[in-house]
Image: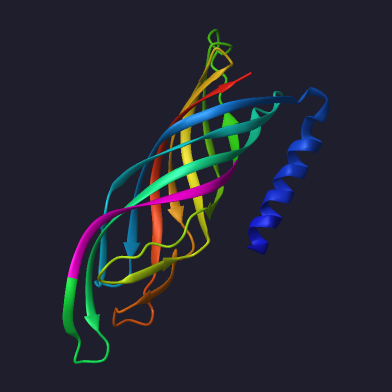
Amino acid sequence: MNSFKKIIIALTVILIGAGAANAELRFGVRAGMLINKLSFNQDALKANNSCGWTAGAIVDYTVPIIGISMDAGLMYARMNNATDVTATDVNTTNALIGTDNAIYGKNFLEIPINVKYKFTIPVVGSIVKPYLYTGPNFAFRLDKSITNDVANVKSRACQVAWNVGLGVELIRHLQVSASYGFGINSVVGKVSDINTQELKARNNYWTVSAAWLF
């Protein structure tokens, strides 16, 4: 976690020092769709793609001269995890005690922080401006861990991912983007009733969103 803090501080210092006098600070709102999937390192649990959504407020800091900007958001995210659970009894010889298939909703407070590079296109640069972006995303769980009849799965309170995406800014106000988040830490804190001691899962997801900057 300390490495992420250093990266964020360094990027902020670079952006501020590069052209504070010409910088543009804008606020806006963003909403979009999430398609996430849990990737497990064991066969005890499997997951399918699930759809959710996200919405919230953002701030965009732009340095026009060098084409670099930075944005940060405060977002509510609904991530649905569809799991196929196969559990065994640890007190017997790995006897199968049941399977389950269900969709569990998760509510998160997300804080994405991205660095963007905007490309200037001659003639239409003020109307259409494509960009690339990347940065960390911190998601803090707002509700309790899921519980089902077969296995008690407890997720961690914080999920960390790294986003890589592309987008386009239209008429200087509308931003449409798509990104992929690579899960960094394991989101599973504890799994009982499943005969494994080192079960790990990372949450990877696509995000397609639109933002309006004022």
Residue occupying the point 18% across, 69% down: 99
Q: Which sits in the foreground, 193 or 34?
A: 193
Q: Which sits in the foreground, 69 or 144?
A: 144
Residue 81, position in %: x, y? Answer: 33, 53
Does residue 94 lie above or below 73 as drawn?
below
Q: How many marks?
A: 0
Residue 191 relative to residue 65: left or right: left
Q: Quadrant of residue 83?
A: bottom left
Residue 162 relative to residue 113: left or right: left
Residue occupying the point 70% across, 45% down: 11
Residue 204, position in %: x, y? Answer: 39, 52
Image quadrant holding the N terminus, namely: bottom right
Residue 158, position in %: x, y? Answer: 54, 59
Does residue 94 lie above or below 5 as drawn?
below
Residue 180 relative to residue 132: left or right: left
Q: Quadrant of residue 84?
A: bottom left
**Bounds of the magenta segment:** 99-113
**Outermost residue to the front:** 149
Image quadrant holding the C terminus, namely: top right
Residue 167 relative to residue 194: left or right: right
Q: Is residue 79 magenta?
A: no
Q: Is residue 102 magenta?
A: yes
Secondary structure that dominates the magenta span: strand
Residue 112, position in %: x, y? Answer: 57, 44
